[in-house]
Image (tube, helix red, strand yellow):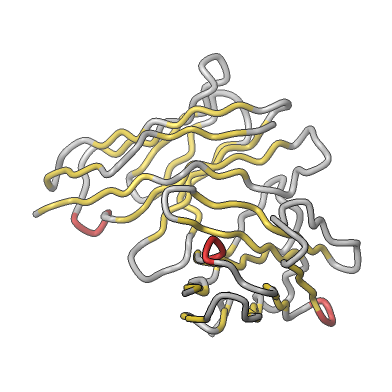
């Protein structure tokens, strides 16, 4: 498909385990975003990648969270030593340009449940 | 910092009723404003946008007008359909700051339209 692809769609893990969430953006999109959607909290910005520039990591909630983007395409969000408060839907989005006039194209999200 | 406040849901309407979802914002600069929609089981998608004061964004029968004097961007539709049932998110990007690529979202409003 031509849209943003995320995997897994659902992940159940035990507290303390590490998880990896994957995002495959739309081909040719240089900007990639991770957001977190928690119940009743809206969407929380996590991290932004633009081309070869240093990513904006200002939204990562703790040092247990990290993300990388290899070759300017696929991105992986890693959560180490998961906690119950990490349970949320993790959304990835991509954009062909900076956001002045553009729009974000979102994937369907990865739902993480930490038991 | 930037913030978006939208009316709490859920909102339940009958088909063909008039819809208003209120959205107000706080921004340090001169933002672009957006409404995104999330249909059940799908990713967020842009519904409409406005980039300057008094602009009206419109799409699929929905409208919203950028009101700088009241810092508002209320979403309206004259006659809703069952297929409009979704979660609606108001968002902004602040073009004057260094982070003009970020979208700041409201918490979302769940709309249910009954036949």
Task: Indicate left or right for B36 with A7 as reference.
Answer: left
Residue extending farthest front: A16
Q: Residue at x 41, y 59 (%)?
A: B38
User: Looking at this view, is A41 or B45 the one in front?
Assistant: A41
Q: Residue at x 66, y 66 (%)?
A: A94
Q: Quadrant of residue A83?
A: bottom right
Q: Give the x, y percent position of residue A115.
A: 47, 74
Task: Indicate left or right for B65 with B50 as reference.
Answer: left
Task: Indicate left or right for A19 with B41 as reference.
Answer: right
Q: Residue at x 73, y 27 (%)?
A: B29
Q: Indicate whether B64 appears above or below B102.
A: above
Q: Residue at x 13, y 48 (%)?
A: B15
Residue extending farthest top: B69
Residue extending farthest right: A53
Q: Quadrant of residue A27?
A: bottom right
Q: Quadrant of residue B42?
A: bottom left
Task: Indicate left or right for A46 with B109 as reference.
Answer: right
Q: Give the x, y percent position of residue B81.
A: 20, 52
Q: Give the x, y percent position of residue B59.
A: 41, 48
Q: Indicate whether A41 appears above or below A111.
A: above
Q: Indicate whether A78 appears above or below B60.
A: below
The number of numbered badges drawn on the structure is 0
User: Looking at this view, is A102 or B38 the one in front?
Assistant: B38
């Amino acid at each position: 498909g031509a849209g943003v692809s995320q995997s897994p769609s659902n992940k159940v893990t035990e507290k303390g385990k590490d998880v990896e969430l994957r995002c495959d953006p739309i081909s040719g999109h240089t900007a990639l975003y991770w957001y977190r959607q928690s119940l009743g909290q809206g969407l929380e910005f996590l991290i932004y990648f633009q081309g070869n520039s240093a990513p904006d990591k200002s939204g990562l909630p703790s040092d247990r969270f990290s993300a990388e983007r290899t070759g300017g395409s696929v991105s992986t969000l890693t959560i180490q030593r998961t906690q119950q408060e990490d349970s949320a839907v993790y959304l990835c989005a991509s954009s062909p340009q900076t956001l002045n006039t553009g729009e974000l194209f979102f994937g369907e999200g990865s739902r993480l449940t930490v038991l | 910092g930037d913030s978006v406040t939208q009316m709490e849901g859920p909102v339940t309407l009958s088909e063909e009723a008039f819809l208003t979802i209120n959205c107000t914002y706080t921004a340090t600069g001169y933002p672009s404003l957006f409404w995104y929609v999330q249909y059940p089981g799908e990713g967020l998608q842009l519904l409409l946008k406005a980039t300057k004061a008094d602009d009206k964004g419109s799409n699929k029968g929905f409208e919203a007008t950028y009101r700088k004097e009241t810092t508002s961007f209320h979403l309206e539709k004259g006659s809703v359909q069952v297929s409009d049932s979704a979660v609606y998110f108001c968002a902004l990007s602040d073009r004057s700051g260094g982070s003009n690529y970020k979208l700041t979202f409201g918490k979302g409003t769940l709309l249910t339209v009954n036949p």
